[in-house]
Amino acid sequence: MPERSTTLPDDLRADVQTLWDYHDMHHELRPANVGIGLGSHDLGVATFTAELFHAGMFPLIVFTGANAPTTVERFPRGEAVHYREHALELGVPDDAILVEPEARNTGDNITLTRKLLESRGIEVGSVVLISRPYQQRRAYATCKKLWPDVDVICASRPLPLDEYIESIGDVDRVINMLVGDTQRITAYAERGFAIQQKIPNYVVDAYDCLVQSGFAERLL
């Protein structure tokens, strides 16, 4: 199997950086009732969730996620289950973690987490959504649609683009995921899955250039 590149080509850098910056909600972190770690292929989500817990940003964590085709090999027991195990290794107490193991998309993440917390009688006025960096905007839009009364703060590991690509180990995968999430901002709002958000023309132009360059694996 050929080694995957972690080097972002110079001719793609500006467009990739544009999408990367667009998906960052630039929220200022503040304490909340619950931290919700959204399942994905990126174990760094669990790492950062644990760091925020230890920093006192929230007293309770919910890890949410079953599997997707992109995660089943890495996390065979489910994304949320592996996230929990990683957080325990990082010193988070077991009684501070709830696991929601059924969600298969971001809408499920929000809806099923909300139901889990309600079933435990846990009142929630504010949440920190911890996700991959390029999932922030979509997670925010989905949460505001499905859980409109809750105060939402988005957070991700504060890594520069190149360091994030290095941590994932596959530049093409990161670009494809960025492109796919950009398309979903519009598509999911049109389908009623998320609130509408403005996409500046320069972001649309960067998206179009990357699609034309062949990064279409994650398009709907």
Image (cartoon, rainbow, N blue to C red):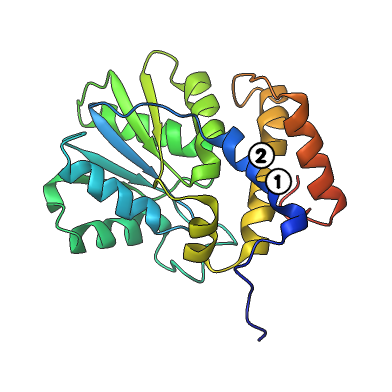
Label 2: state its secondary structure. Answer: helix
- Please say whether residue 41 is visible from this viewpoint: no
Residue located beneath label 2 in the image = 18
Residue receiving disc 1: 14
Q: Residue furthest bottom?
A: 1
Of residues 42 and 116, which is closer to you in this image? 42
Residue 84 is drawn in which quadrant? bottom left
Task: Using a 10 Å C-alpha cutoff, classify the residue at mark 1 as few (fewer than 14 neighbours), some (14 to 19) or many (20 or more).
Answer: few
Front position in the image: 85 or 152: 152
Checking the image for residue 86, the label placed there is none
Of the pair 132 and 122, the residue shown nearer to us: 132
Three-letter residue code for mark 2: Thr
Residue occupying image coordinates x 49% and y 44%: 133
Query: Does residue 182 appear to the left or right of 79 in the view shown?
Result: right
Q: Position of residue 145 (x, y in %)?
A: 53, 20
Residue 160 x, y percent position in the rendering: 48, 50
Asked if the residues shown at circle 2 and circle 1 are in contact, with their CB atoms under 8 angstroms apart, the answer is yes
Q: Residue at x 59, y 24 (%)?
A: 194
Q: Establish if 82 lies above or below 129.
A: below
The residue at 43%/48% (across/down) is: 102
Could you say where residue 28 lies in the image, as x and y percent from the top left? 35, 26
**Label 2 Cα neighbours within 10 Å, binned few <14 / some 14-19 / many ≥20:** some
196 to 105, vertically: above or below: above
61 relative to 158 in the view: left or right:
left
Instruction: Name the image quarter holding the N terminus.
Output: bottom right
Mark-to-mark CA distance, 2 and 1? 6 Å
Residue 23 is left or right of residue 204, and the answer is: left
Quadrant where the image shows the C terminus: top right
Residue 179 visible in the displayed image: yes
